[in-house]
Amino acid sequence: MQYGLDIPTAGAFADPRTLAELAVEAEEAGWDGFFLWDTIFMPGHPEIPVVDPWIALAAIAMRTQRIKLGAFLTPLPRRRPWQVARESVGLDHLSNGRLIFGAALGYHDLDFTPFGESFDPHIRAEKLDEGLAILDGFWSGETFSFDGKHYQIHDVSLQPGPLQSPRIPIWLAGGWPRRKPLRRAARWDGIYLMTNNQDTGRMLTPAEVREAISYINANRIATGPFDVALNVKPSEDKHQNAELVRQYSDAGATWWIELEPTDQVTEQSFAAYREHIRRGPPA
């Protein structure tokens, strides 16, 4: 099991230098991953300041040596895939191959509708699938063409390619028991599995995690490693967290990624979360 952090980019967290300092402390404390929200607005609070995650990740890449990094999760349907291809390769080089690319449909309309972008789930799903295929094509380093419903590309090569081979790892968001997002993730390199059951709202049991992983494996085509990351709100009881880690690891999960537990982005919650990070992962 590896241990990561899912860090806000709003409010008290909305500063690239602050996030870079926090990432250094996380690396020193033994965490394996440092991942940032990718959102234009704080959900429900458009008045709260937000920092661009890719700018912050560049600062983090320059200050850290070992820890994996990425934006969790990038709503690819509201981004131009060729621009994302450039940015992600640049960050992969800057970090010496430590980038994980996390992608999703996007989960709140404030990031779409004020800018004239469709929030229709079917259109977002189509754009996500096309965007992922385009990223994979550009990352190959070969001359690439694509003729899709939403994007058309004619004989383009983007150089350089990423440091990582065969590509920058792609993780997709998904929730059990929703099958379609899990089938999409199965085509790539990992899943960021929502820890609450999408029907009941309760925290996934190890048995449900095992069932989700079994479903993904049954739909896998590519060979090679596949990561299963759980996003969790940690308990104040570190021993309880460690026991959950053991159970989820036995079920097949490979990453334990902790959310800021209060859903707050105030100075007070930032200070408390910073102390939590400094105490290290629940290993």
Image (tube, grey):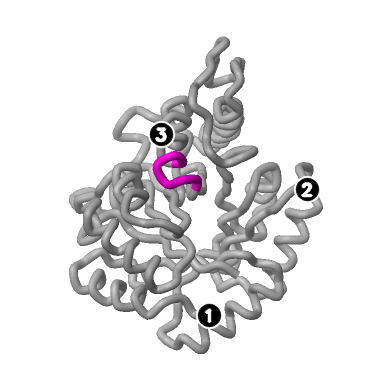
Q: Which residue is mark 2?
A: 219
Q: Amino acid at mark 2?
A: Asn
Q: Residues within 10 Å of mark 3 (few under 14, many from 20)?
A: some
Counting residues from the start of the chain, the first of labels 1 and 2 encountered is 2
Q: Which mark is residue 125?
A: none
Counting residues from the start of the chain, the first of labels 3 and 2 encountered is 3
Q: Amino acid at mark 3?
A: Glu
From which residue to which does the magenta span run?
A: 92-97
Q: Secondary structure at mark 3?
A: helix
Question: What's the CA distance linking mark 1 and mark 3?
Answer: 33 Å
- The spot of residue 272 in percent (x, y) is 27, 77
Q: On the rendered structure, is 153 left or right of 58?
A: right
Q: Foreground residue, 56 or 186?
A: 56
* Res 8 quadrant in image: bottom left
The relative height of residue 4 versus residue 129 in the rendered view (above or below) is below
The relative height of residue 64 versus residue 151 in the rendered view (above or below) is below
Q: Foreground residue, 197 or 206?
A: 206
Q: Which residue is mark 3?
A: 87
